[in-house]
Amino acid sequence: MPKYIYNFGGDAAEGREDMRNSLGGKGAGLAEMTNLGMPVPPGFTITTEVCTYYMENESYPDSLEDDARQSLEYVEGIMGARFGAPDNPLLVSVRSGARVSMPGMMDTVLNLGINDTIIEGLIKRTNNPRFAYDSYRRFVQMYGDVVLGVKPKDKKDKDPFETALEELKEQRGVKKDLELTAEDLKGLVATFKAIIAERSPVPLPEDPWEQLWGAIGAVFQSWSTERAIAYRRLNNIPEDWGTAVNVQSMVYGNINDDCATGVAFTRDPATGEKVFYGEYLTNAQGEDVVAGIRTPLQISELKVEMPDIYDELEGYYQRLENHFHDMQDMEFTIQDKKLWMLQTRSGKRTGLAAVRIGVEMVDEGLITPHDALKRIEPEQLNQLLRPVFDGKEKKKAIEEGKLLAKGLNAGPGAASGMIYFNAESAVEAKKIEDDKDEKDQSEIILVRIETSPDDIKGMDASSGILTARGGMTSHAALVARQMGKVCVAGCGELNIDYQAGEMRVAGKVFKEGDFISLDGSKGEIIEGSLKTIPSEIIQVLIEHTLDPKDSPIYNIYSELMGWADEERRLKIRTNADQPDQCRVARAFGAEGIGLTRTEHMFFGGNRIMAVREMILADNEEGRRKALDKLLPMQREDFLGIFRVMNGLPVTIRTLDPPLHEFLPHTDAEIEELAGDMGIAPSEVKTKVEALREMNPMLGHRGCRLGNVYPEITEMQARAIIEAAVMATKEGVKVEPEIMIPLVGFPNELKVQEQIVRKVANEIFEAEGIKVDYLVGTMIELPRAAIVADQIAEVAEFFSFGTNDLTQTALGISRDDSRGFIPYYLDHKIITDEPFQTIDQGGVGKLMEWGVEKGRTTRSNLKIGICGEHGGEPRSVVFCHRIGLDYVSCSPYRIPIARLAAAQAALQDK
Amino acid sequence: MPKYIYNFGGDAAEGREDMRNSLGGKGAGLAEMTNLGMPVPPGFTITTEVCTYYMENESYPDSLEDDARQSLEYVEGIMGARFGAPDNPLLVSVRSGARVSMPGMMDTVLNLGINDTIIEGLIKRTNNPRFAYDSYRRFVQMYGDVVLGVKPKDKKDKDPFETALEELKEQRGVKKDLELTAEDLKGLVATFKAIIAERSPVPLPEDPWEQLWGAIGAVFQSWSTERAIAYRRLNNIPEDWGTAVNVQSMVYGNINDDCATGVAFTRDPATGEKVFYGEYLTNAQGEDVVAGIRTPLQISELKVEMPDIYDELEGYYQRLENHFHDMQDMEFTIQDKKLWMLQTRSGKRTGLAAVRIGVEMVDEGLITPHDALKRIEPEQLNQLLRPVFDGKEKKKAIEEGKLLAKGLNAGPGAASGMIYFNAESAVEAKKIEDDKDEKDQSEIILVRIETSPDDIKGMDASSGILTARGGMTSHAALVARQMGKVCVAGCGELNIDYQAGEMRVAGKVFKEGDFISLDGSKGEIIEGSLKTIPSEIIQVLIEHTLDPKDSPIYNIYSELMGWADEERRLKIRTNADQPDQCRVARAFGAEGIGLTRTEHMFFGGNRIMAVREMILADNEEGRRKALDKLLPMQREDFLGIFRVMNGLPVTIRTLDPPLHEFLPHTDAEIEELAGDMGIAPSEVKTKVEALREMNPMLGHRGCRLGNVYPEITEMQARAIIEAAVMATKEGVKVEPEIMIPLVGFPNELKVQEQIVRKVANEIFEAEGIKVDYLVGTMIELPRAAIVADQIAEVAEFFSFGTNDLTQTALGISRDDSRGFIPYYLDHKIITDEPFQTIDQGGVGKLMEWGVEKGRTTRSNLKIGICGEHGGEPRSVVFCHRIGLDYVSCSPYRIPIARLAAAQAALQDK
């Protein structure tokens, strides 16, 4: 007979962390903590198999009720209390716990096992009638809501329990729940019961066992609600996974002043520093710490208040880190001077902390470099590259008395911007800024007394977050760290008045739109906007203004990158069009250029005139005349790039965008051009009009230009090869790779290749010198991936252009996707923005086919990616998995790609 | 040892028609004719294997020269003349002949085996010095050009031989070659030789054997010219196929009046009538008949002039048709009263003739219905559906004296239009007409003395072609029949003056732009524009104004369609949006509707106002209000369609195009709408602007509309299902198939399907009646094809939207393709216009995957196609091959699709 229930508590648990499939995530975690010998409130987990059984048979396995009674007795034994016993009652919580968390599932019922008789025992035991009635009314409210389904009838209807609570407070003339007396709460229990009697066909059970059985049934039934089924259908979660149910004895941090509740970290989650770090509140519930309603005390205060407990807690923290080999985020509750551990899990941390903790744990011998590499999210490296305040300027500002206040350094980094007091106005302001020219844009800083989930969009729109209340584990601090935002939390000196729309601090008044600066690493709030300078890593690597030995951050970064480079198989190249960009890319570790866009060189002064002349020419002769002017400029560009990239491959793409992109569009521009070219403005206008396309993305661009106007490709091939020859003569080692874009039919490439080879041979013959070069193509149309075997007969390399491949495979214009993609993401119709991370199920399949077919024809085919996905970690891992040789990304994303490539390689081990 | 040379002539040939790979197309054809016992000028074919050998070894097989000498002796024996013998010389032609014809290959050298000595023998034998010197100068010219490479140096340079000829005519003061004397031509031979001596490094060989060997080498070398190699590379023709060389004795139709040359058909190629049909010219060369310089005589005249020859020829024609089981197009030459058969091949014919010949040959027992079905090009059926002149109106015009003249009925049909005298002005005029509204457009009629290949584009732009000279086999007549154009040829009464830009006939003068009418079936030229009425088939099937028994054409059509329907496996549906169209489609044999575009119903009067209201609504409530107005209209539309399609499936697609297509665009329209809606024009303008997209084809359209605005899908589902319920109550049998467009992610379909099913269930419950219906999707994005297995979990049917699938798979906007697709086709970068016929190598692969994956999930998945390719014969065959259940096309293409589907099924047998 299968085992349906697993107990935990005392000094042992029947379950283990690796039994998530049966116990769910929550159940497995509770079991593991118990096994580590920590004081976990005892309880038991009913397995997911029972859920499956229940769905199939609409009843429970025969033995279940007996098993549950036995498990409850086991819990009673440990707690020295009895479920349903009025003299010494055991109360329990009931929670669902599937393998993955899922909206629509029943969440929690607390304080279960109570009724009008039993509460007397609870009052006697705690000697706190107010606490007892508050617990009772919470039970009735939760049970009524989640088990009996007493909810608002529609969107306009209010929650009936909350309404009753508000009415009571109004009657009593009080504002806070805490101001209600035990008698008030007792009355509220009666009111709540009346609401249930009126609204629910089933009454609230008085019998504790019936309460428990009802709650368990509600969890299992919630697996089959319409909402849960729809969610699973959209997210491909199997129906038969089921959910587990956790029944656990209650412990309380809010009975009296010998009670407390808190959160602690084994290292500082903001900076990564190896210190025991945390905060707590006396006589409080866990949600009070997170909700930011009271600013909690530092954990060091606990040492003073309850030294024994502090010592016990401190005794656990290193053990937990050693066991899980990672920084832990622990929740604990102290009830009547007894410590209970409620949860431990890997702690969320900033990017800076992630890197520092990873590298230092390796140095401490706690984890291996592989572990460190696997654990750091590549995107987090971004935080190490962010600008910091210019030290001199900040010092000056502080000397001038502009330091307004200090708060908790909850999210490191530097942010200067305009303050806004609510999420909507922050989002609105961000939109206005985004529409400005980049140089005129300002950052947004969200200032709140405390934040809640309603503020997420506003936090996302902001660069910095400042709160008056709440600690390092408050909502604001947690979310800021997750989002990588600068955050100063719990700054009690702030006086924020939403009504007046102002913040008062240090005797000054700030309105919406005023500028302040936040140093999230130090917790400082400074008046006005402060200048930023590049991060230390950039100062060391690129600006050479900082000695490596003076920068611990650089050294951590460098150590991590070294490990990454040892592991990864993928090469990392960069997308760069100018020698300057190439220099930055090399400093970040680029091993070549994956994409030089020749058209980026077409803008600016003289050049655009020659380009326009070429486009407006009526015949080949006119085009050649204009191209002759462009040739020396392009050659000079390529020579500059070859010099910087000495010894590394350089992929240069021939002309790609629709020609009309280069044309003037305003009347003024048209007149100027017409004047310069000595033709009538109307003639220019006609030509521009003729070149306008309905769907330029699918128009006359890419190799379609070089095929219809071969002289363009000739000029570009000449510029590349002549530059390569010149560089070679200078002693530079060149590896040009000429890339033909937007090929769909193999012949398109054949014709272009013939042009390139012909020009190259002419130059080699004339110069008496030969340079090795490759001719290849972008794979950026579905057709190209489909006929990759034929294309590889000509192409010596492929480079996936995943921007265009995504647009065509999905039939979505990136420019026009805002009408539905955000809606799709919100409504879970799709899970990822396909222009951010490769759509592996669609675009990825085409890539796999392209690789497979290409290598069937040419086993040593060099294959890379140069779409913007090339710097996105999940996409990098995918590129590794399907066997690409390299990814190419913008210079500043190279460190991210290096780390992601290493993670990909480690997945193979 | 392999056999390198195959002789033919006398009463036998060593080769056969099925040896094309060795003998090339031409060599195999000559062998077969010989084997049939016809008098073919003897000769021999050097195989393609020799070409391969020559390329590999740069020399000929050892035995080749001996073999060739023996073969030449064999020819000499038959012809009673000797190669290189001055007393009785044998002259030969040398021609290349690969498996497929190929540009860049050497074509022909005639009269080879002549020199200053031998010509004397030729003069003696023919007693015609002018003929002999004309032959000699032609040989020198051709040999100089194609063997010795004496050609114009560049595009501006003129052909040196033609220049010398022109200069001579100018000296002599004559206009035509024929006016030059024997002495003149003798001098020209000397001039030509001097040109060769000056321009060619190698002199013109005097020795006949050297001449022959030089010409053979030139053929083989021409296989390896840059142009030929590039062509083969683009067209995937293997290098090792090689070319054969044909050496054949010359026969002449132009020595004296006992000579003639002609062309004959075993049936009338214009009407298909079973009569011996042809024309010839006495004392002429073959090219004179085709070039249209002289209008040839009807073959019946030959019976008078040379009764024995006529009898002999008549004796062959039925034998040839019986042998090849098809209408033959024969070339013959009479030299000194001896008949030589030079060629027989399946004759080109009009669509009308193709159908009539096919059906009649079956009735005669000559071929099977299968043969007939295979032989008729489906597109040719179009010609049977073309309008004809209104008999009454034409009679009236003739009575009014408007019949201008009669010519040859070379291309049947009726055409009225504006006349133009050269190709350029016809093309220009066509462009102007195409830019007009359809109702204001006029047809173009090209009028020429005779046509040449330079006129092709002008012929293509014209509906009718009229020539003053040339017969049924003239260039004009041949091309018109191939293109399916109306043509009256060889109307000697026309006096066309290109200089004056006018045509004089029947005492009247016509200028460019004047209207005439051509009855190509009768050869009549009528003044002015004549009204047309529908073809007989449409009169019978749709208008019911003609009794089937009075229309032979209808009966032929009907017989053919009957055979087609017996063979085909594919069902044929139609794309139709209105009951009228549905009626036409059923008359043509539609077996259901494959696509009803609901948005086509959105235009017109009241409706567009409601649609615009919906689009401009700021919220769901506003949209619902507008949708409520549309509901009854859409329901009425669907009910009308269900009634007509009683008993057949009807596929209805939910809203597809980008919403801004429905919006007003001009200022006037915007003002009107703003007025009607009681809002400011600026507000309308802002909304229109906000809806504008960069690439609308890839924008917010298709199911993306129904997903973001579910109320639209709700309304449409309601209209469809309510109409289906109403129809059912009327006793109509309905099979609605609701089709969701532009699905890329399976969830997009899941969400839409849930909406449809919910609405349907509500209606069924309310109405107390259930109607079977299907929910399916278009497969029109590459991603949809890739994840077809997942989509088929929801979709009950697929319909390939190959228009969009082509646009996305190839990354080509149909609207913007004119910048490069025509160039690609001209330059053979691609062989087919992908929006006309399915790109089988790219789009087709996605379709194959879609079918395979879809049926993996749902083995009985119904799959069709509703893109415009569904009515294109090659695409229909492809759809059959990959296992679709039906194709859907516009009503008038249904007969074509039925025939193509039958051909596809026959290919399986």
Image (tube, coloured by chain):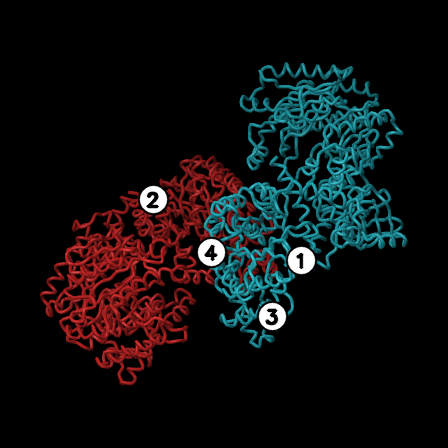
Chain colours: A red, B cyan
Which is in the foreground here, disc 4 or disc 1? Answer: 1
* Residue at the farthest left position: A308
Q: Residues within 10 Å of mark 4 (few under 14, many from 20)?
A: few
Per the rendering, the mark at residue B644 is 1
Disc 3 and disc 2: Cα gap in Å? 58 Å
State the residue position of label 4: A603
Quadrant in which residue A146 is drawn: bottom left
Instruction: Classify mark 4: helix, strand or loop.
Output: loop
Instruction: Classify mark 3: helix, strand or loop.
Output: helix
**Residue B791 percent location from the top left of the image:** 47, 51
| Left or right of B10 on screen, residue B887 | left
State the residue position of label 3: B609
Whichever of callouts 2 and 4 sits on the residue coming sooner in the sequence is 2
Which is in the foreground here, disc 2 or disc 4? Answer: 2
Q: Chain of mark 1?
A: B
Whichever of callouts 3 and 1 sits on the residue coming sooner in the sequence is 3
Which is in the foreground here, disc 3 or disc 2? Answer: 3
In the image, residue B315 above or below residue B379: above
| Left or right of A145 on screen, residue B368 | right
Q: Amino acid at mark 4?
A: Phe
Q: Residues within 10 Å of mark 2 (few under 14, many from 20)?
A: many
Q: Residues within 10 Å of mark 3 (few under 14, many from 20)?
A: many
State the residue position of label 2: A570
Q: In which quadrant will I find the C terminus of chain A? A: top left
Instruction: Classify mark 1: helix, strand or loop.
Output: helix
> Do marks 2 and 1 share a chain?
no
In the image, residue B805 above or below residue B196: below
Q: Nearer the viewer, residue B846 or A61?
A: A61
Which is in the foreground here, disc 2 or disc 1? Answer: 1
